[in-house]
Image (tube, rainbow, N blue to C red):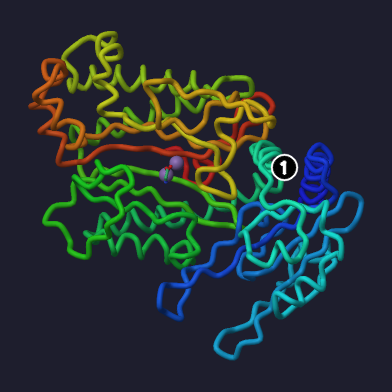
């Protein structure tokens, strides 16, 4: 599938260049970022516009030069440094598509570039050398907008990479669930996940959220406790895996025993599948978010967490205390992929619903979009604390909240690839439907 992807990326980039009145673009992989007063570097992450062309993830300083109508050049940077293993080009499906020039310094990179760069754009770190190199424009917003906008529509190759990233994450989620059932700590569960994925931490697309019990109420919980809690009530695991530069973003919530919380998880699972069934071309993602808010509100009423009617809960905003994030986002080379609120590639934006500032996607779905579907329902102290003494207090059954609070919350998150008439659920294909 890569040759067709490469051809499509070339076509879209040529179009964006022509409309930006530019001849060529240099895509920079990024430079290593050093620690203050130290000789170490932060883990290197290649820049997404570079990764779009090739899954070369470990060659900082490399560049891809594209000019419409000619074969792109990969300026492949190899450090001649006996402290580290120099990068090597993999024997893989993609390098043959490039004219490869190996370089060992920035000066050699400059020498490998065309002499006249006045009509060439650079996308990447704004290196101090660029002015002296005569680069015409650095990160020009119009070109970048055009590329960001079009990246929402994934090629079949990209969807296959995301499907593979889901297959790998599914192995991790299975191992993590087993570790939870065996009484592991958050740290143990994390290690079980990463090990089953075969990926070290810096290779994962984002820091895994491994939350036991109350911690599941913290949306981006970042702690990995080493101690094993006395009781394992619930696990919320939001963890993805990488493949060829693409990342999956998958959440499962597991209850350790039957009971009200386990029932809530089952209800959310069905609710999530119902929302997945709405994802198809032409639907405005803001409408899917609104449907999610409505359905979660209804569930909160049925579960006895809310005492008022669903209409009042919606209008007053009471139910948003329990679901304060967006229903999903674009997914691809970045976990929260670019272009989610772009109306077009000319600079227009599609506003977020005023009451839902955390929604990251406001576009209509198109075939090729890959999105997450991630309804959640949490018992968040930071939101419920102030509500206890406010206007919402009468709408909430606080005893019910107290009973469910020790479980933290529920999130179920799948990755959907929008097709011509619906969507493929990449996560359930990998993990199964139960
Ligand atoms: N893992 C972050 C998110 O679900 O958006
Ligand atoms: Mn997630
Ligand atoms: Mn997500």
**Relative to residue 167, is residue 149 drawn left or right?**
right
Q: What residue is shown at x 26% (from left), y 29% (from top)? A: 322
Pinpoint residue 26: horizontal percent, then vertical percent. 75, 57
Coordinates of residue 421 in the picture (x, y in percent): 66, 24
Q: Residues within 10 Å of mark 1 (few under 14, many from 20)?
A: many
At horizontal 10% and vertical 33% (from top left) the residue drawn is 402
Q: Quadrant of residue 115?
A: bottom right
> Which quadrant is the C terminus positioned in?
top left
Residue sitting nearer the eye, 116 or 28: 116
141 with respect to 11 (left or right): left
Q: Position of residue 198 (x, y in %)?
A: 49, 66
| Vertical side of 153 occupied by 183: above or below | below
Quadrant of the displayed image that contains ligand 1: top left
Q: Is residue 4 above or below residue 301?
A: below
- State the residue at coordinates (52%, 46%): 430
Q: Percent from the top left, x then y, of residue 349? A: 58, 27
In this picture, is 247 found above or below 60? above
Give the left or right position of residue 14, taking residue 231 as reference: right
């Amino acid at each position: 599938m890569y040759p067709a992807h490469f051809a499509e990326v070339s076509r879209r980039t040529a179009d964006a260049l022509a409309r930006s009145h530019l001849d060529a673009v240099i895509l920079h992989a990024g430079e290593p970022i050093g620690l203050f007063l130290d000789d170490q570097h932060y883990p290197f992450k290649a820049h997404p516009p570079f990764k779009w062309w090739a899954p070369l993830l470990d060659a900082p300083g490399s560049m891809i030069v594209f000019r419409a109508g000619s074969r792109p050049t990969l300026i492949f940077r190899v450090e001649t440094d006996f402290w580290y293993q120099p990068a090597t080009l993999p024997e893989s499906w993609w390098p043959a598509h490039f004219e490869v020039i190996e370089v060992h310094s920035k000066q050699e990179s400059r020498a490998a570039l065309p002499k006249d760069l006045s009509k060439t754009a650079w996308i990447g770190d704004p290196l101090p050398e660029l002015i002296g190199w005569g680069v015409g424009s650095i990160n020009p917003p119009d070109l970048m907008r055009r590329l960001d906008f079009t990246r929402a529509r994934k090629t079949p190759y990209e969807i296959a990479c995301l499907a593979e990233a889901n297959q790998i994450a599914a192995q991790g989620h299975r191992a993590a669930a087993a570790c939870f059932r065996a009484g592991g700590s958050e740290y143990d569960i994390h290690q079980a996940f990463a090990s089953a994925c075969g990926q070290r931490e810096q290779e994962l697309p984002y820091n895994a959220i491994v939350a036991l019990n109350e911690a599941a109420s913290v949306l981006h919980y970042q702690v990995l406790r080493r101690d094993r809690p006395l009781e394992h009530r619930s696990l919320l695991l939001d963890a993805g895996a990488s493949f060829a530069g693409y990342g999956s973003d998958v959440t499962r919530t597991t209850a350790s025993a039957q009971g009200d919380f386990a029932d809530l998880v089952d209800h959310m699972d069905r609710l999530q599948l119902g929302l997945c069934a709405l994802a198809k071309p032409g639907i405005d993602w803001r409408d899917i978010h609104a449907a999610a808010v409505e359905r979660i509100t209804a569930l909160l009423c049925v579960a006895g967490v809310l005492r008022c009617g669903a209409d009042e809960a919606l209008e007053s905003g009471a139910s948003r205390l329990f679901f304060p994030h967006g229903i999903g986002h674009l997914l691809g080379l970045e976990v929260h992929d670019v272009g989610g609120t772009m109306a077009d590639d000319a600079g227009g934006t599609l506003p977020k619903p005023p009451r839902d500032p955390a929604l990251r996607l406001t576009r209509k779905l198109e075939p090729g979009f890959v999105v997450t579907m991630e309804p959640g329902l949490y018992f968040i102290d930071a939101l419920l604390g102030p509500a206890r003494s406010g206007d919402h207090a009468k709408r909430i059954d606080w005893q019910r909240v107290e009973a469910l609070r020790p479980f933290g919350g529920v999130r179920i998150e799948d990755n959907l690839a929008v097709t011509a008439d619906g969507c493929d659920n990449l996560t359930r294909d990998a993990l199964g439907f139960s």
